[in-house]
Image (cartoon, rainbow, N blue to C red):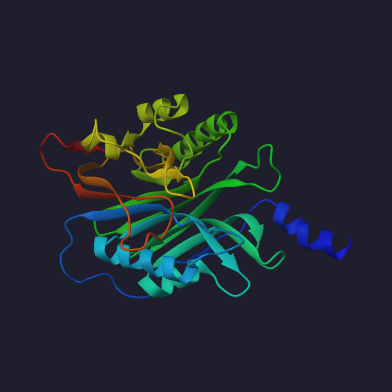
Amino acid sequence: MNPSARRLFPALAGSRRITLSRWPQRPAPEKERTVLTVMSANLCHDWPRYRRWAERLESFASLVEREKADVLLLQEVARTRRFQADLWIAQRLGMAYAYSKANGHEKGIGFEEGVAVFSRYPLDAPRLHVLGRGSVPFVGRIALGVTIQTPFGRILAFSAHLGILPFENKVQVRQLSSWIGRMAGRRPALIGGDFNAAEDAPQMRRIREEWIDTFRRLHPEADGTTHELRWPWGGSIRRRRLDYLFLRPGRTAWSVVESRHVRASPRPYSDHDAVVLRLRPAGPGPDRVCV
């Protein structure tokens, strides 16, 4: 095999390896916690330019601190030979984490990107599902899940990044739902990610019959846009909701306290807005959700 082929082959290989750091580097705050705060975000790796990469990551970390997020479900977490975004985030925020690549190969071609779950609480039992490379051999799609030992009990958390082509996206949503169903059983589960599908797409309408769309539960008529394509001179081309945070029904009861879309300021970390969800073990009331 010639040198160019040796560098290219790892980028085509499917992802099977998980980087895992089970324990947070800093303990969670000692004060009594009444809510679990979860954030899902696409970090926008911006290969091969990596524009403002360090600045954007710091902007994201500051957003996590402002929101006091306990769990992060991230996509487009990038690595190069000189810098690993997953390790930087874990050290910067003192979190436990699991990461797996979806595309590229850090050592083979000098770049890779994937999905990750970060937590202020211990995590274990990582699991990975390859959703398929589809019609483009260099583009893989995966989902990564872990079990998190929160003060409110053990909960499963999944981060996913799905394909752009509609016919492939439909299959991947179905695969993701089936896999998470097998993994979670009757246990509570959080699913966050860049689904690359608008909420009126048939597969997204179907998935909301199985999972609770936490943003729509509290904001049934609000503008849900999380991603906007813009012309170089600033005009809008297309605005869509692509990023979601779902709650999968299980045996435990929770209250959805807050669900909203947020953007770091003054400089955004990505071309996607983050989704923030706050949950509380449920008491009586209209926001009670059995999960």
Q: Position of residue 62 (x, y in %)?
A: 32, 67
| Closest to the observer, 145 or 198 | 198
Residue sitting at x 15%, y 64%? 32
Please identify the residue farthest to the left as the structure is shown. 284
Horizontal side of residue 258 vs 213, given as left or right: left
Examine the rendering and report whether any part of residue 291 can be seen. Answer: no
Count of marks placed on residues: 0
Q: Position of residue 250 (x, y in %)?
A: 32, 38
Quarter of the view holding residue 240: top left
| Closest to the observer, 256 or 85 | 85
Quarter of the view holding residue 30: bottom left
Residue sitting at x 71%, y 44%? 137
Residue sitting at x 36%, y 63%? 267
Please identify the quadrant where the N terminus is shown. bottom right
Please identify the quadrant where the C terminus is shown. top left
Horizontal side of residue 277 vs 183, given as left or right: left
Q: Position of residue 144 (x, y in %)?
A: 50, 51
| Closest to the observer, 215 or 147 | 215
Q: Position of residue 166 (x, y in %)?
A: 55, 30
Quarter of the view holding residue 237: top left
Horizontal side of residue 134 vs 121, given as left or right: right
Please identify the residue farthest to the front as the structure is shown. 233
Examine the rendering and report whether any part of residue 124 can be seen. Answer: yes
Judge whether 30 appears above or below 272 on screen.
below
Judge whether 158 appears above or below 219 on screen.
below
